[in-house]
Image: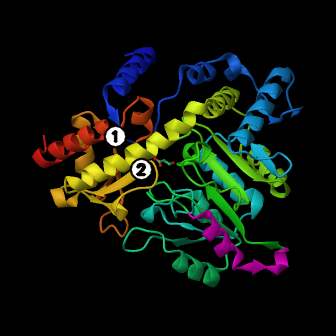
């Protein structure tokens, strides 16, 4: 089959299934048009207006505008914040943020992958785990972050950077508490406080839409991808306090990357424009309402939901009471056109490849117009599939 035919096949698959992967979404036609535009033909190494190639007047305008929009969706001033929209993905954005702020070998504290953090938050198989000295915190037995415990770990470890942000944590992040925790350790020799980085990749759209508290009053650096709740293309950005942003920019280019992907940057700009429309607030709120409805319907049907519910766009369910592992449950659901991902649950006795849980999210189905009543139907269908294993 040709690539063109395979793309058609994948488009049809995306239309046919119920997509409950919390890190996926469906972008608008305008974003697809930006991604498929001739901007992909252009090289523009460097920052806008400081490029190594010529012919960049128009793409400079585009990048400048996208940076302005990135600040606008979070109501930030360019007097205080610098933006970089060039990272190819969240992984590179995180690596660049660490390298450009605290540098290699620094002590960094983050949430462990097993408890809901991210691979690039210093997991041992990621280069972030090899290039820096990471220590991790997790969640308590009840699945909730225990901020007193995080503070104790912080004071003992004395990191120069604290990371908050998760890929599989269903509750609100208390950025104010994380700030206080970071401030409980001082580094007079470095002449600055412990930095706080919020990786809001999962919740960026909720923050922009007012459905989750913002990290910006408290964090020094915020990293994010744009393809999840923000409903943009697969790209990333870093927003950092002005005094940190020059070094972070240098870590992105020339430190880690070459020419920026301008078609993606333009696609991100379109996503930011869409996030500024009044309807986006309703979308963000509905994503959370749907996730809450899905969690409560599954709970009514006997599912064990980690932390008993959710405050955001995702939930974690332990499927072992059905006599299934997360992998088996995911495969059964896929056979029946419901797409989830297998996921570790807190303190999981099983391994990541075949864990005890599944992770479910509502950004994509909300984009398709589904509401609470649809979540009730989906929950019943999930139960039927897992009970009868067909
Ligand atoms: N792998 C992504 C997720 O699904 O959460 C994060 O990078």
Magenta-colored stretch includes residue 42: no
Q: Is residue 143 placed above or below 29 in the rendered structure?
A: below
Check the picture and name the quadrant holding the C terminus.
Answer: top left
The residue tagged 2 is: 314
**Is 210 in front, or is 186?**
210
Q: Is residue 133 visible?
A: no
N-terminal label among 1 and 2: 2
Q: At which x and y percent is residue 55?
A: 85, 20
**Does 3 sit left or right of 196 as displayed?**
left
Residue 258: quadrant of the picture: top right
Magenta stretch, main secondary structure class: helix
Label 1 CB-ligand 1 distance < 8 A: no
Q: Does dot 2 land on a helix, a strand or a loop? A: strand
The colour scheme used here is: rainbow
Q: Does dot 1 land on a helix, a strand or a loop? A: helix
Check the picture and name the quadrant holding the N terminus.
Answer: top left
The residue tagged 1 is: 372
Q: Is residue 178 visible?
A: yes
Q: At which x and y percent is residue 142?
A: 37, 71
Query: Is there CB contact under 8 Å for labels 1 and 2?
Result: no
At horizontal 61% and vertical 43% (from top left) the residue drawn is 208
Magenta-colored stretch includes residue 182: yes
Q: Which residues are magenta?
A: 174-191
């Amino acid at each position: 089959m040709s690539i063109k035919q395979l793309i058609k096949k994948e488009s049809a698959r995306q239309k046919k299934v119920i997509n409950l992967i919390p890190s996926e979404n469906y972008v608008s036609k305008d974003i697809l048009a930006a991604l498929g535009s001739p901007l992909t033909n252009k090289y523009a190494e460097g920052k806008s207006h400081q490029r190594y190639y010529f012919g960049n007047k128009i793409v400079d305008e585009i990048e400048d505008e996208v940076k302005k929009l990135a600040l606008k969706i979070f109501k930030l001033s360019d007097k205080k914040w610098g933006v970089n929209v060039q990272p190819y993905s969240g992984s590179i954005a995180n690596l660049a943020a660490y390298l450009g702020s605290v540098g290699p070998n620094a002590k960094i504290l983050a949430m462990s992958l097993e408890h809901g953090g991210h691979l690039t938050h210093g997991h041992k198989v990621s280069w972030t785990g090899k290039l820096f000295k990471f220590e991790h915190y997790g969640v308590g037995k009840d699945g909730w972050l225990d901020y007193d415990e995080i503070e104790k770990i912080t004071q003992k470890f004395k990191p120069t950077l604290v990371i908050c942000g998760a890929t599989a944590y269903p509750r609100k992040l208390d950025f104010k508490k994380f700030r206080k925790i970071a401030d409980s350790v001082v580094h007079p020799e470095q002449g600055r406080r412990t930095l706080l980085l919020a990786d809001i990749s999962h919740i960026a759209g909720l923050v922009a839409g007012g459905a989750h508290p913002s990290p910006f009053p408290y964090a020094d650096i915020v990293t994010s991808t744009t393809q999840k709740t923000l409903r943009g293309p697969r790209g990333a950005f870093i927003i950092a306090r002005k005094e940190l942003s020059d070094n972070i920019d240098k870590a992105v280019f020339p430190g880690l990357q070459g020419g920026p992907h301008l078609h993606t940057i333009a696609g991100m700009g379109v996503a930011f424009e869409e996030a500024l429309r009044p309807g986006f607030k309703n979308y963000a709120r509905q994503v959370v309402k749907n996730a809450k409805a899905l969690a409560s319907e599954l709970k009514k049907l006997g599912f064990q939901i980690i932390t008993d519910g959710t405050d955001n766009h995702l939930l974690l369910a332990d499927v072992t009471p059905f006599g299934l592992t997360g992998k088996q449950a995911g495969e059964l659901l896929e056979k029946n056109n419901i797409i989830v991902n297998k996921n570790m649950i807190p303190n999981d006795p099983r391994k990541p490849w075949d864990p005890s849980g599944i992770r479910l999210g509502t950004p994509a189905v909300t984009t398709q117009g589904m509401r609470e009543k649809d979540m009730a139907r989906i929950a019943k269908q999930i139960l039927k599939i897992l009970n009868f294993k067909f």
